[in-house]
Image (tube, grey):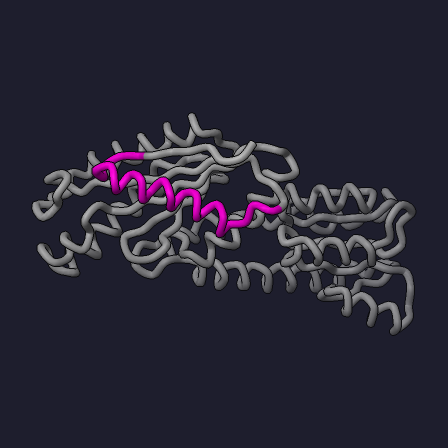
Amino acid sequence: MERLKPYLHQRPKLLIVDDQPLNIRLLHELFRNDCDVYMATSGEQALTMSRDLAPDLILLDVIMADMDGHEVCKRLKATAETSQIPVIFVTGKDHEDDETIGFELGAVDYIRKPFHSVVVRARVMNHLKLKLQSDVLREMAMLDGLTGIPNRRSFDERFESIRAHALREQRPLSLLMIDVDYFKKYNDHYGHLRGDQCLRDVAQALNDNVRRPHDLVGRFGGEEFAVLLPDTDETGALTVAEQLQMAIAQLDIEHRASDVADRVSLSIGAATRLPTSTASLEQHLHWADEQLYRAKSEGRNRTCIQRYGA
């Protein structure tokens, strides 16, 4: 639960989308003391801000000049980065058919104009509480039970959103595959309790030394870990790998059964690629695995790296 505490104390982010400044001001006044309130005055701006801010809830006007709320919601739900953001439609219409369309598009509620401040506030705060509870449960399901860092499922999901961003910006994406050298021999020599503690210590050291907010360390199972480094070329990836090697060496964990050192060490394979629409997670993992195999075949306790494609 320690990893969740900082999140639990953050103010929720509320995005208000309306092309009428008066409506935005009224809603802003209702929620500015409880939320970090952001405002968009067009559909395109709302889509961009949703990707960049990842708000906890969107209040979305149905009728707007450039792109109506239904189309905005449709695009939000069709994009992996924004599909899980709850949307409440705000509308002056009073027809059941409009509500039906909204719910079919994925909205969680409707608010009608003119606003009744008590009702609006109650509905919004209830949905923010539900979003927080959902996020906490989802976060817990995404953590590895032994080490407390993200698990494979979490890593896979995050990769898709990070790859999509890298593809839009045409920035390099690096992936490190990491193996604890001769870990089976460690377990056989010291026992599984010591082995579990070793993995926890290694995971913590990796996590502590990958410091940028969008970098990601995950456990793939057994003694295998992965590190995702957005906006990082092969030089940067090699620098991070060397830092991780040094951090594990500084743990100074005895490993008398190792064939490469008398302390726990790592083999790392790194693959860098400028993302394309066809470069999947499986392909990137395959490239990093190739380099990990090379690191092992060349003696372990080292990093091998390769840039693939353009």
Q: Quadrant of the C terminus?
A: top right
Q: Is residue 293 magenta?
A: yes
Q: Is residue 171 visible?
A: yes
Decide which of 133, 293 is in the foreground and name it: 293
Q: Would residue 243 appear left or right of 276 to someone viewing this image?
A: left
Residue 17 pos. (x, y %): 78, 48
Quarter where residue 250 is shown: top left
Type of secondary structure dominating the magenta stretch: helix
For image coordinates 44% across by 63% down, the residue present is 141
For image coordinates 39% across by 50% down, the residue present is 218
User: Hey, which residue is sitting farthest top in the picture?
Assistant: 235
For image coordinates 36% across by 40% down, the residue present is 291
Q: Would residue 246 appear left or right of 117 to someone viewing this image?
A: left
Q: Is residue 34 visible?
A: no
Q: Quick check: 280 above or below 208?
A: below
Q: Quadrant of the N terminus?
A: bottom left
Decide which of 148, 15 is in the foreground and name it: 148
Decide which of 29, 109 is in the foreground and name it: 109
Q: Quick check: 27 above or below 144?
A: above
Tally of numbered tags: 0
Residue 28 pos. (x, y %): 74, 46
Q: Would residue 2 appear left or right of 186 to someone viewing this image?
A: right
Residue 109 pos. (x, y %): 74, 66
Magenta span: 278-303
For image coordinates 77% across by 58% down, the residue present is 74
Residue 216 pos. (x, y %): 44, 44
Q: Quick check: 166 above or below 238?
A: below
Decide which of 119, 101 is in the foreground and name it: 101
Q: Is residue 261 magenta?
A: no
